Amino acid sequence: MFLAIENRDVVGRIAAIYNKTHLDTYRDHTGFFGFFDAVNDISVAKKLFDACEQWLAEKGMKKIIGPANLTTNDSCGCLIEGFQYPPMILMPYNKVYYNDLCEQLGYHKLVDLNSYNMGNCTSLERFYHIYEKAIRAMVSHLI
């Protein structure tokens, strides 16, 4: 984990991720970055990515993919469109300029990922009947 600090204020963060399971499986010398967050300043982003890249290079990584927050079981990717919609659980949501910062630093899209939207659902009230039915089924098995 790396922090960018200016005048005692945190202005950015990034995680360099060495995923042993991935490396044992694919043997591709790939590291990951994740949990990227920064002000809209290319010099701040560059310092964070440089630290991440250096740390992963010291571990023998020749390629970096991200954002991937710890594992692909966590949120992956960078939202590049759809900012007019509210964030959804388990879907990446970031500031509009993140993708531009990554591209300016030489990172480019590897694959398209889709982010899902629950539509006009502003509350989960319509899902309560499903929840109640599931609870009744679980309780009936316990009795």
Image (cartoon, rainbow, N blue to C red):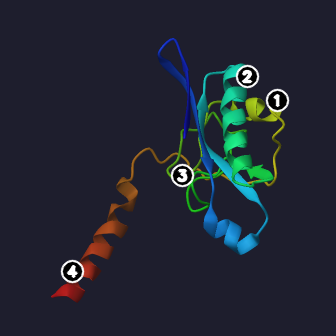
Q: In this view, does 76 lie above or below 129?
A: above
Q: Where is residue 26 in the image (x, y as percent from the top left)?
A: 75, 71
**Cα distance between the residues tagged 2 and 4:** 55 Å
123 relative to 133, above or below? above
Quarter containing the C terminus: bottom left
- Expressed as whole percent of the image width and height from the top left, the position of residue 20 reads 62, 65
Sequence-earlier tag: 2 or 4: 2
Question: Please, is residue 27 above or below residue 79 in the view?
Answer: below
Instruction: Measure how far apart labels 3 and 2 are at the Cα level.
Output: 34 Å
- Cα distance between the residues tagged 1 and 2: 8 Å
Q: Name the residue under label 4.
A: 139
Confirm whether residue 79 shows in the render.
no
Secondary structure under badge 2? helix
Q: Mark 2 points at which residue?
A: 42
Mark 1 or mark 4, earlier in chain: 1
Image location of residue 106, percent across then percent down: 84, 36
| Secondary structure state at the residue bearing disc 1 | helix
Q: Which circle marks residue 104 in the picture?
A: 1
What amino acid type should be assigned to the residue bearing mark 2? Ile
Which amino acid, mark 3? Answer: Met
Mark 1 and mark 2 in contact? Answer it, CB < 8 Å.
yes
Question: From the viewer's perspective, is 130 left or right of 22?
Answer: left
Residue carrying label 3: 118
Q: Earlier in the sequence, mark 4 or mark 3?
A: 3
Front tag of 3 and 1: 1
Q: Residue furthest front?
A: 58
In front: mark 4 or mark 3? 4
Question: Is 130 placed left or right of 29 in the picture?
Answer: left
> Which comes before the other along the chain, label 3 or label 2?
2
Query: Residue at (69%, 19%) from the top-left corner?
Result: 41
Q: Which mark is residue 143?
A: none
